[in-house]
Amino acid sequence: MDYNTFIVLTGLLSTGLLLGGFGALVSLKGENLTADVAGHGVVSGVVGSQGLVALLGAPWLAVPLLWACGFASSALTLGFIFWARARGYSVGAGQALAIAAAYGASLVLLSVVQGYGAFSTKGLTTLLLGDAATLTLARIVPSLLALIVGILVFLVLRRGLLNWVLDPQSAVLHGRHRVINLIWIVATVAVVLTCLPALGLTLLVGGLTLPALIVRPWVQGFTGLVIGSALVGGILSVAAGWLSAGVLPVPTGALVVVGLGVGWLTSFFAARALRVLRVRRAAA
Amino acid sequence: MLLLSQDLPLLITLLCAAVTSVLAGSLLLPRGQIMISEAASHAVLPGLILGFVFSGQHGLTALLGSALAIGLFVGGVGWFRTRHSLGAGVEIAALFPLFFGVGILLLSVTGLEDTGTIDVDHILFGSLELLIWFEIGQWGDILRPRAWTSAPPQMVTAMVSLAVSLTLLVLAYPFLNRVLIDRHHAGLFTPVSTACVRLLETIAIALAAAACLRSAGVVVAVALFSGPVIAAWSFARSLWQVWLFGTLVAVLGVVLTYAVSMLTLAVFEIEARLSGVLALWLVVLALLAPLVARTFGSNRPLP
């Protein structure tokens, strides 16, 4: 295996593990679409940061500005959703307006930034669809760091996370819901930003959702679901990346998500078939 | 000053796509399923590509393929909704990236991306600025049948989508209006008639998604589906009023978009992407509508 393939597969492994584990929490809370919207909120920040770099003429600021602007725009988008909910809009209406505003702002900013030649529509397409084949060590380090932090946070706060996910009222009673909500916002944005280069925004929500759905029929308990989901996400991402590198010359991100989708449908129907068999055996 | 050969097809396409989306969005919002519009506009991709592969053009077959893909997606969402023990909206979040991923793979496998016949950039961000209707030089040309033979296919798709969608929904109006007010009302009808209405809804969503895909782009579809309907919600008391107010908001949004884009071009020499400006205006109008409604004494709950 050459160095480039090794880096791409390592990036896909960390992305898959991170998205799978975090996705299990998000899926249990039913906030997958909110995470998707938050992800799309990143785009305007990324486009804006490219414009700022061109305006300031300081290429060395590209990475810090990308993170700062991406974080700010995504947090604003999430803030908009929570504001809309607090005002009385339904969950769906808040998400729809937030994603519309995020897309609109991104495209308008793109028009402005294109004037400086700092960013192109192709760049935006890459953000939306990802480009795992061009992953470098510098681009996978954030996801590796986020994975390590995520594992540590999960080990330390496992009980608190369980309560927050499955019984939000207990977090409210303990007076910790604001802190945990803030952690959730920061974690969502961090996961989205770190996993963006591999899968892209449009496919990222698949990486968040599908591993948990694959594992759900086969495990019992919170810890099993999170760990199982992370492992399935990681393994299937690497498998799809390996296939894409050697056997099937197709876009890696799309192959990862379609592979996860096939895994989900197989798991779903296998679980149903097993249940039917058990019932028949019990009846006999 | 309007340049008819460029501005007229753009306005017609955008307005037809917007009103088709209002019709579909009015069915989704009361059920709390408006995010299906965002998902469906992505899920349409494999159907569009397969339709193009079979027919070799962006015509009726591509539209039919889009409708079938959306039908499969909406049907799948409904089926999986009751069959998993995870949170709300998980089935949408699972299915739409899967459909979109299949679409991207199909683009790559068929080689269409390399030929430029289907451009991912245009699918995502729209291609409104590229619409040109060469045969139209003055208003009178619209009445010449020959001019319509060279009408931009995106515009024709949007117009056909609007006509079909409006006809179907007007035919099913009494049932739809009652069901949206009282969800249990559907239980009073036979399963066959309920299934027929569900089919009509799916077709309406598919047509709107296809119209958006070929004009404003996938990414702005959610704004067209949700913004006008959310704004109309503050004023309307029945389904036809949602359609009427939603259409008025969409028209206002398109007019404001046009005005702003011409202004930015004249003052800053920046050609702002029309689909992006439109999305922002629709969000602003959706947020302003409840405030305006309150000043007129309306106290409708927010959608």
Image (cartoon, helix red, strand yellow):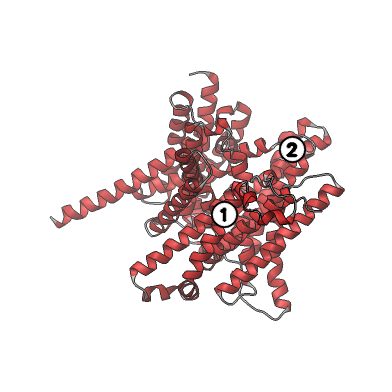
Is the C terminus of chain B in the top left, top right, bottom left or bottom right quadrant? bottom right
Residue at figure coordinates x 60%, y 53% from the top left: B221
Mark closest to the chain's N terminus, 2 or 1: 1
Q: Residues within 10 Å of mark 1 (few under 14, many from 20)?
A: many
Figure check: A110 above or below A14:
below
Q: Nearer the viewer, residue A45 or A103?
A: A103
Marks 2 and 1 belong to one chain: yes
Residue at figure coordinates x 43%, y 55% from the top left: B77
Inter-mark Cα distance, 2 to 1: 25 Å
- Measuring from the top left, give residue B159's x and y in whole percent: 58, 56
Residue at figure coordinates x 59%, y 47% from the top left: B153
| Residue B216 visible within the image | no
User: Which residue is label 2 attached to?
Assistant: A50
Q: Is residue B109 left or right of residue A276?
A: right
- Measuring from the top left, give residue A20's x and y in whole percent: 48, 43
Image disc number at residue A34: 1
Figure check: A266 above or below A90:
above
- Measuring from the top left, give residue A59's x and y in whole percent: 77, 31
Chain assignment, label 2: A
What secondary structure is marked by label 1? helix
Residue B142 lies in quadrant: bottom right
Instruction: Tell me the kind of residue under disc 2.
Output: Gln
